[in-house]
Image (spheres, coloured by chain):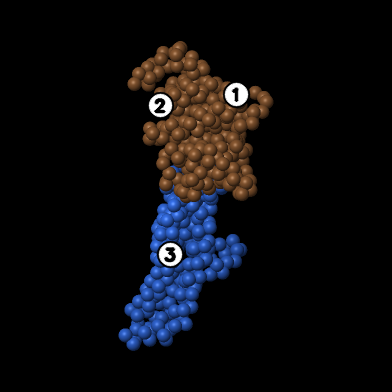
Amino acid sequence: MTVTTGGPLIVLDGVNKWFGPLHVLKDVNLSIERGEVVVVIGPSGSGKSTLCRAINRLEPINSGTIVFDGRPLPAEGRALAQLRSEVGMVFQSFNLFAHKTILENVTIGPVKVRKEKPAVVRERAMQLLDRVGIASQAEKYPAQLSGGQQQRAAIARALAMQPKAMLFDEPTSALDPEMVGEVLDVMTSLAREGMTMVVVTHEMGFARHAANRVIFMADGQLVEDAPPTEFFENPRSDRAKDFLSKILTH
Amino acid sequence: MAEFLRVLTDNWSLYSQGFTNTVKLFLVAAVGSLVLGTLLGAMRVSPVPALRAFGATYVNVLRNTPLTLVFAFLVFAVPKLDVNIDYLPAAFLALTLYTSAFVCEVVRSGINTVATGQAEAARALGMTFLQVLGSIVLPQALRSMVPPMMSVFIAMLKNTTIAAGFSVLEAGAIPAYMSERGEPQFAVLLWITIGFLILILPLVVLQRFLERKLAVAR
């Protein structure tokens, strides 16, 4: 949340990625400023999740470079673990640790990875859980919570590491419709506070009102990169026009 | 019936000595193979290709070698390299090396039952491979590991009798002594069977206990 001076926080340069014969990221160039909220949309299979996961190297790339906070992504090992600890990640399927309580889920990162004092972390964790509205569920196990509550807990878990950026990989796609709003509310407030965010989503409403930029991907390429009003009202490419007509007509 | 009991009481010292060694072999090999097998299991899922290859090679070689042959290597072949190894330590080692391969596979299959998202979330937090394994994956894998692990250990308890062929006085060596003493083989063998049943019973109880304990842990 601290805005330090310097260049963009995340820079992708000529990134290529193959899954076997499938070329899922094609020469992707992208630069994300500190405090920017970038929403990535596009049809399924367009590579948007892969792009998101490549930023903390959960998905290694085949060529090109990814620079985070001035440093190129290190190879697997301690340096990479250190970098990942500075990037929060929220998954489509929550991935809360099933054998830990909600509070333990939020405290385990700072305690194990950062070696912070458990008492200090616990206090911060409770504040975060309070902020996402589930402080009363702290002692429960993930399976006892609704999907929306689990996803808010997962956001709290990522925030507990005090990350420089947050990656959201379709955070509301696995939720029942009535729970989407509560998760988007948390994300919107984060965006307002100036968190750097990369959000892969199908929530066009969120893209419209919370994003600084919308990126449209198709077939592994960045097809459009524009402010939300411009993108939604005046898409330049046929692919984007086609995609928007399909999702916005009903 | 009196005759049947007499076989045991008259030869009590032989039976107790034999079964004591069986229990020793079992306990040492159980602890040893649990440690070594878990290490090998960790290697097989590690991000380092060389460790993965080592783990896979170990399992394929040891799991496919007859246990008698592992014993023979340690008792007859290794001393030719001027490494002196006594019969009992050789038996400890043979059982541990052999059983580790099976424990490794139980650990690995247990790890595979844990959803990949669990490890991914842990890595995304910045945990190292060992933290991911120790704090997130293995605790969740334990539950599904208990039944096959117990089968491996029960098999190993019975495998200890192979040590009899390599100069270790354990339960499997009792029949040979008893036939020299002219005791009736039926009674002799029945007592050994009863002895093994008594030894296996606690393992079955332990399995039940662990399954129940790990089931309520969420």
What amino acid type should be assigned to the residue bearing mark 3?
Answer: Leu
- Are the residues under marks 3 and 1 on the same chain? no
Looking at the rendered structure, the secondary structure element under dot 1 is loop
Q: Position of residue B101 (x, y in %)?
A: 47, 55
Residue A33 x/y as whole percent: 60, 23
Q: Is residue B83 left or right of residue A175?
A: right
Front disc: 1 or 2: 1
Which residue is under mark 3?
A: B206
Q: Secondary structure at mark 3?
A: helix
Q: Nearer the viewer, residue B58 or A104?
A: A104
The colour assigned to chain A within the rendered structure? brown
Q: Which residue is mark 2?
A: A44
Viewer can see residue A76? no
- Locate residue A241, reporting x and y percent: 41, 15
CA gap, disc 3 to disc 1? 57 Å
The quadrant in which the C terminus of chain A is found is top left
Residues at marks 1 and 2, CA–CA distance in whole angstroms: 26 Å
Q: Tell me what residue is drawn at x 43 percent, y 77 percent.
A: B174
Please say if A29 is above or below A122. above
Residue type at numbered disc 2? Ser
Separation of disc 2 and disc 3 at Cα? 49 Å
Drawing shade for chain B: blue
Residue extending farthest right? A5
Residue at the spot x=51%, y=44% of the render? A135
Do labels 3 and 1 touch, CB within 8 Å?
A: no
Q: Secondary structure at mark 2?
A: loop
Report the disc number at residue A89: none
Q: Amino acid at mark 1?
A: Glu
Which numbered mark, 3 or 1, is in the foreground of this view?
Answer: 1
Please identify the quarter of the rendering in which residue A239 is found. top left
For disc 3, the neighbor class at 10 Å (few under 14, some 14 to 19, many from 20) is some
